[in-house]
Amino acid sequence: MTVIPATAVPRLVRGVRLRHDEARGQWVLLAPERVLNPDPVAVEILKKVDGTRSVEVIIDELVSAFTVDRERVASDVDAFLAGLKEKGLIETMPSPIGDAAS
Amino acid sequence: MNVIAEPRPAVSTRPAPPAPYGMLAELTHRCPLQCPYCSNPVELDRRNVELDTETWLRVFSEAARLGVLQVHLSGGEPTARRDLEAMIRHCVEVGLYTNLITAGVGLTPERLAAISEAGIDHVQLSFQGADAAMTDHVSNFKGAHERKLAVAREVRRLGLPLTVNSVVHRANIEQIPAFIELALELGAKRIEIAHAQYYGWALRNRQALMPTREQVFRALDVVEEARVRLKGRLTIDAVVPDYYARYPKPCMNGWGRQSLNVTPSGKVLPCHAAETIPSLEFWNVREHSLQEIWVESPAFNAFRGTDWMPELCRSCERKEIDWGGCRCQAMAIAGDAAETDPACHKSPLHAHLLALAEEDSHSRVNGYDYRRYLTERDQ
């Protein structure tokens, strides 16, 4: 499995969208000819996959929002993102675009 | 849900059906290609009966409210509509995922850039063959293949996800490995290998299209091998050839269960071939909202669920797997849309269907009755 560096910034590839499906009261990940139903943990991660947050920032934010063990969160996030990348649903950039210093 | 205003026993006793996920929007029947297996009806809608822009935008809004998530902008050739970009922008605005299903031949780089700019999510491009000779022959359009190649490259240059869509039949079924190579070479992430489905135009051309049993089984092996080999690089979605199958295809994953289809003139159908069933009453978006049509129209309720099924299907353990198979095929072969799909080995007509396939597959007829407007009246 590919390991994504902590400083890399993931984003959904063109043709993949996360949205809330009001009619069914759930979040869905839309892709070519596919509708995926991410579980609640996956949804919280996906909401932060926006092309500006790095993997470590995503992990930090989840840790402080849910007061959970960092190691546990980090391994969940790493595995989940690696899976998405393998399926071609996300791409990663080496660092945030533009304001790399902030 | 409480939506009953007036007493309509046939409807009000029925629980509201779950919302559909997908909508096929056939924006026009106009198309530069003449594929002999076209999924459009034999009687094509002319330009002067097409819905106007405003009506389509309303339909997309209604679809989003109803729970539709993905819209497939199709035809005919959807890019024949000059208002396509306006429709895409509107779909994006109301949250719909948009998929363009195009033949590609009339598509300039400028137009494609405008479509991309409007927010299209995914492009599905048809190839009638894996090489120029085959594509041009099957589509009856000289130069079609070259133009498609150029469009595919442009789609990828714009960073849009690409699916190669290939319909296979006797003449091109041996090209499946070449279709897969073509998809990889063009940078497609997905390929659809769909065996021709015999309704409408394809039924008319069945003698020239039907592959032999040997061809079909070899094709299934080729696809399976490629699926394993290309896992993670290319998604291969296959539409199975049901004439030689043991079980019928779960057509539309059940009638009126997950998707709907709006024709160029505004009729709403449970599947694109549904008009081949003469007893059905279709409602039109000019007179009804999409919600009303989905929940209440006679055509959608005719074969919804399992109550309509003949005993053979109702007592079958696969009734909610196959959903009775395909109603249009039951109509075409058994002469009754409420019969068991003859593709099922339990159907008394199964041997008859197989015999039809065997006979047609060895036919010497190889010329096509190409898709066209049957009478030359207006335009």
Image (cartoon, coloured by chain):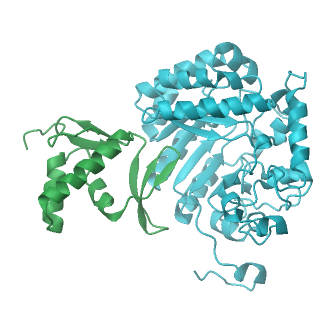
Chain colours: A green, B cyan
Q: Is residue B247 left or right of residue B58?
A: right
Could one spot residue B169 in this view of the protein?
Answer: no
* Rendered location of residue B42, percent (x, y): 84, 40
From this view, report whether residue B108 is shown above or below residue B12. Answer: above
Q: Is residue B81 left or right of residue B279?
A: left
- Residue at the location (41% across, 28% down)? B158
Q: Is residue A23 visible?
A: yes
Residue at image x 64%, y 16%?
A: B131
At x 74%, y 49%, the residue is B265
Quadrant of the image occupied by residue B136: top right
The x and y percentages for residue B315 are 77, 69
Outermost residue toward the left in this view: A101
| Residue B348, x across and y down, in percent | 90, 55
* In the rendered image, the vertical position of residue A75 relative to residue B219, given as above or below: below
Label count reads: 0
- The answer to which quarter of the image holds residue B301 is bottom right
Q: Which quadrant: the C terminus of chain A?
A: top left
The residue sitting at 74% across, 22% down in the picture is: B138
Query: Where A94 sits versus B21, above or below?
Result: above
Q: From the viewer's perspective, is B195 left or right of B36?
A: left
Percent of width and height locating residue A97: 19, 37
As drawn, B157 above or below A84: above
Compared across the picture, whether B208 is left or right of B39 comes to right
Of B121 and A30, which appears nearest the observer? A30
